[in-house]
Amino acid sequence: MHKRSLKFAAIALALSLSGCGLFPEKIDETKDWSASKLYSEARDELSSGNFEKAVQYFEKLESRYPFGTYAQQAQMEVAYAYYRQGDQAQALAAVERFIKLHPNHPNVDYMYYLRGLINFNDKVSFLDFLSKQDPSERDPKAARDAFDSFKQLAERFPDSIYTKDALARMKYLVNAMAQYEVHVADYYYRRGAYLAAANRAQIAVNEYRDAPAIEEALFVMVRSYDALGLPELRDDAERVMRKNFPNSVFFKGGPDRSGPWWKIW
């Protein structure tokens, strides 16, 4: 009982001392900063790579001066800071919030572009085919989201300074997503799941008609239909392939080789 009383007394003494200023609360250095000062310091932290500190300053700026022009700029800068910090969820949330609050802002095109970049650089790469994970379990959702964001930018702001780069990234994403489908189709084929392989290759052909990966997708369809004993579908796929890719490397077997060309591979 005596020890417990001493313990309580020590706690009470510590609390009283803190009230006397021996253990003062942490002083907020930004307490008296103006909006311009907060913004300037936040930008400096951002430029120096101190993204966490930059976010803190930008959020304080918006909280203290919510109706000024600096507040709207801070909202944009916070999204970018989270993006650079690698916090995808917070970055996307900040972007969505800005677009919702300021749909007619003169720089809202940048936020659509940034939303695309955030998804485009998603750390869980859907093209990481060299890992041990079953590729059929991967979903290129981030790529689709990025494509949709870039597409919205291009459609709503065709004259934006960001649209040219967005269009280039869209082209890359289409090729990447098509290649993903073909890779999964080939994965199924190599494991004897011929119907699944043909269906997945068909998705690539239907959804990404202009992607280079379509050549291989048709090749997978020819082999899969042949393995399934469906000669009409196989021949249809071959006709489409020869029409669109007459010099395809997949035709290396040729008519003078023993056996059908698709079985030589």
Image: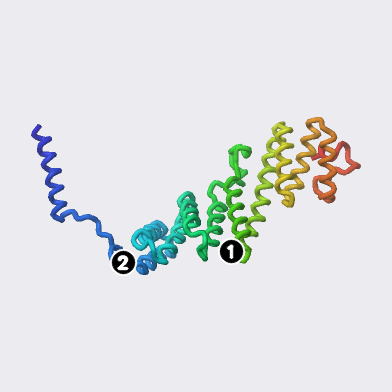
**Circle 1 SS class:** loop
Quarter of image, res 117: bottom right
What is the crowding at mark 2: few (fewer than 14 residues within 10 Å), some, or many (at least 20)?
Answer: few
Residue type (three-letter) at the residue carrying disc 1:
Tyr
What amino acid is at disc 2?
Answer: Trp
Vertically, is 169 above or below 261?
below
Instruction: State which quadrant residue 60 falls in.
Output: bottom left
Q: Residue drawn at (25%, 59%), measured in percent from left and top? A: 27
Residue 201, image x and y in percent? Answer: 72, 41
Local SS, label 2? loop
**Residue neighbourhood size for the residue with mark 1, other residues' Cα within 10 Å, grouped as few (<14), some (14–19), many (≥20):** some
In the image: residue 27, left or right of residue 90: left
Locate residue 15 relative to residue 81 in the image: left or right: left
Q: In this rendering, would 14 be left or right of 142?
A: left
Residue 53 vs residue 137: left or right?
left
Residue located farthest toward the left when viewing the structure as drawn: 2
Are the residues flagged by discs 2 and 1 in contact, CB closer than 8 Å? no
Q: Position of residue 249 (x, y in %)?
A: 80, 48
Q: How many marks?
A: 2
Quadrant of the snapshot with the N terminus: top left
254 lies above or below 27: above
Residue 145: mark: none
Q: Which residue is mark 2?
A: 33
Please provide percent x and percent y for residue 127. 61, 47
Q: Which mark is residue 162?
A: 1
The residue shown at (47%, 49%) is: 89
**Measured from the top left, where is residue 189 in percent x and y?**
72, 35
Q: Label 2 vs label 1: CA separation?
A: 34 Å
Mark sitting earlier along the chain (2/1): 2
